Image (cartoon, rainbow, N blue to C red):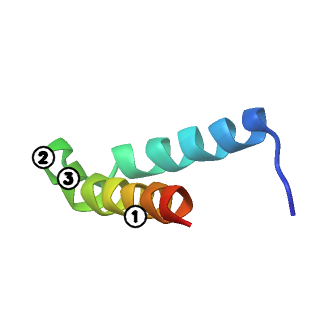
Amino acid sequence: MTITQQELESRLWDAANALRGPVDPADFKTYVFPMLFWKWISDTWVHEC
């Protein structure tokens, strides 16, 4: 399944908006750091292979 850049951005924006309500801004690190780590691992894996 492939999605366009615009669809991806829309889904990510919707997810960010969903989190904005119930999550205290100081707690965003709980969600963002694991995603950044996963992205780093993914990029490193692609680069090394």
Q: Position of residue 19 (x, y in %)?
A: 39, 51
Local crowd size for mark 3, using a 10 Å CA cut-off: few (<14), some (14–19), many (≥20): few
Residue at point 30%, 52% (across, down): 32
Residue 38 as seen in the image, left or right of residue 42: left
Q: Are marks 2 and 1 in contact (CB under 8 Å)?
A: no
Q: Residue furthest top?
A: 6
The residues tagged by marks 2 and 1 sit, at their Cα atoms, a distance apart of 25 Å
Amino acid type indicated by mark 1: Ile
Question: From mark 3 to mark 2, how far is it between C-alphas?
Answer: 7 Å
User: Which element carries disc 1, helix, strand or loop?
Assistant: helix
* Residue 42 in the figure: left or right of residue 3: left
Look at mark 2 in the image and give the residue it sits on. 26
Question: Measured along the vertical axis of the image, is residue 46 above or below residue 14?
Answer: below
Label 2 crowd (10 A; few <14 / some 14-19 / many >=20): few
Q: Amino acid at mark 3?
A: Lys
Residue nearest the observer in this picture, 40 or 6: 40
Q: Amino acid at mark 2?
A: Ala
Kindly report the distance in space between the C-alpha atoms of the residues bearing marks 1 and 3.
18 Å
Q: Which residue is mark 3?
A: 29
Task: Kindly report which numbered mark, 3 or 2, lies closer to the viewer in this rendering.
Answer: 3
Q: Position of residue 44 (x, y in %)?
A: 43, 59
The label shown at residue 41 is: 1
Mark closer to the chain start, 1 or 3: 3
- Left/right of residue 33 with respect to residue 12 in the rendered view: left
